[in-house]
Image (cartoon, rainbow, N blue to C red):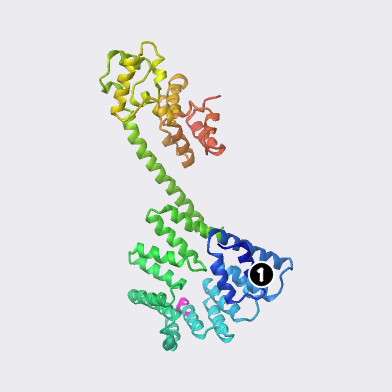
Amino acid sequence: MVTTQDLSTLIEQPAFDSDILNGMKALAFSSHESLARFVELTQGQERAIATGKAEGRPAALKLGLCHWLLGRPRQALEWLSKGGDSKERHYYAGLCQRDLGDNAAARQSFEKAATHGWDALVCACEQAESVLMAGDIDAAKKLLDDHGRNGLNAAAWHYVMGRLQDRLGNLDAAIDRLNRAIELDPRHTRALFHLAYLTDLHGKEETAIDLYRRCIACPPILVNALINLAVLLEDAGDNTGAEQCLRRVLATHPNHARAQLFLKDVVTSSQMVIDEEWERVSEQRSAIMDTPINDFELSVRSRNCLKKLDICTLGDLCRVTEAELLAYKNFGDTSLLEIKAMLTQKGLRLGQLAEQGGAPQARSVMRTRMVVTGSPEVLNKPVTELELSVRSRKCLQKLGLVTVGELISRSEAELLSIRNFGQTSLNEIKRRLTELGVSLRTS
């Protein structure tokens, strides 16, 4: 388990080279908690520089690399530019410049990184990708050809060759090159990402999902990998997985507009699935509960007693208890046994809905008949036509409220007593009712 001390020890090292950066990768992205802690430590380093507690080029380089790890190229480049003249500064500045679309500057940075001691083949491949992104296919091909002998066993070389083949429209060749890059380096983040993208284009969604999952397990995490994976997971019906991906984006990029919008859609979609399942089960239950008592063969005494009690359906019957029936005049044990036998045939029993929360629905119906007045067209209007928010609809469902007439038989206090029903939902319902010319019952 990653501890605060582990992260703090690494980030507080005076020299922040590639070895320490790799250690930070392994620790910071091991869990949601460690990532949150790493974000806090990065903010702490920025405050330390601002207040003079951390000074100089090493502190700027360290902060730039932390921002790069978090997928923030603009902030990273700002601090890397103040981080001295090291191979780390130039190499990671080149990565940031390319992410920001400044491919010419990126190529120059990779040239400087090689001059200062970064691996020459890796820098040549990075330059090739930069000129390729700038649209100069011939220059990219020449750089790769110049390093072809050494590149045959290098993941970086095969990766850029894959990108080149993709630009040339040779998708099969591109996929072969990217696969070779991943064989040589199973944690090559960009190769995994682009192979996942091309695999998705070929209609192999399950394979693409697997590749994207592998990609986001290799820091620094590509934001587009998380978003693309979220799209595929939502299409596959895994809204929970999609939501987790988007929340990971927002953990490091809280103002990411696309992730914010997509997250709202995913959450709403999840709630719609729940609502649809609730409606399906509810319809099945209603079909049984709405069965008229007259459909069953009962004695005259039992039928008359139920009629006087205003019990017309199986649902009405399941809302009353044995004690309530026996308390009625002329209703005895014989009638009780007869009715219980009838319910047993349907897998039901007396008092069942009262125990499951159905009693409020029965009271709602009775109250509607007794006190609600108004236009039948309005009173019989389904609450589903009020265009309420998901939360408001679910709360009304819990109360068993189906029509506007049933809704306005309730008071504000009764609605506010329902779990997760707050003032915002109440105000929304009151506005909708006002538009119809009706209001909730006064307490």
Q: Position of residue 14 (x, y in %)?
A: 67, 74
**Quadrant where the C terminus is found in the figure:** top right
At a point 56% along the width and 37% down the height, the residue shown is 423
The number of numbered discs placed on residues in the rendered structure image is 1
**In-image side of 346 versus 378 (left or right):** left
Q: Position of residue 113 (x, y in %)?
A: 57, 82
Residue at the extreme left of the image, as rendered: 297
At a point 56% along the width and 78% down the height, the residue shown is 91
**Quadrant where the N terminus is found in the figure:** bottom right
Answer whether residue 2 is visible to the viewer in this image.
yes
Give whichever of 336, 420 is nearer the camera: 336
Q: Is residue 303 above or below residue 381?
A: above
**Label 1: which residue?**
12
Residue 287 picture quarter: top left
Answer whether residue 292 is visible to the viewer in this image.
no
Q: Position of residue 158 (x, y in %)?
A: 41, 79
Given the image, on which type of amino acid does mark 1 rest? Glu
Q: Is residue 157 above or below residue 25?
A: below
Q: Position of residue 71 (x, y in %)?
A: 54, 67
**In-image side of 374 versus 54 (left or right):** left
Q: Secondary structure at mark 1?
A: loop
Residue at the extreme top of the image, as rendered: 330
Magenta segment range?
131-136
Q: Is residue 192 above or below residue 104?
A: above
Crowding near the residue tagged with mark 1, few <14, some 14–19, many ≥20 C-alpha atoms within 10 Å: some
At a point 45% along the width and 67% down the height, the residue shown is 215
Q: Does 110 lie within the magenta span?
A: no
Give whichever of 95, 44 is nearer the camera: 44
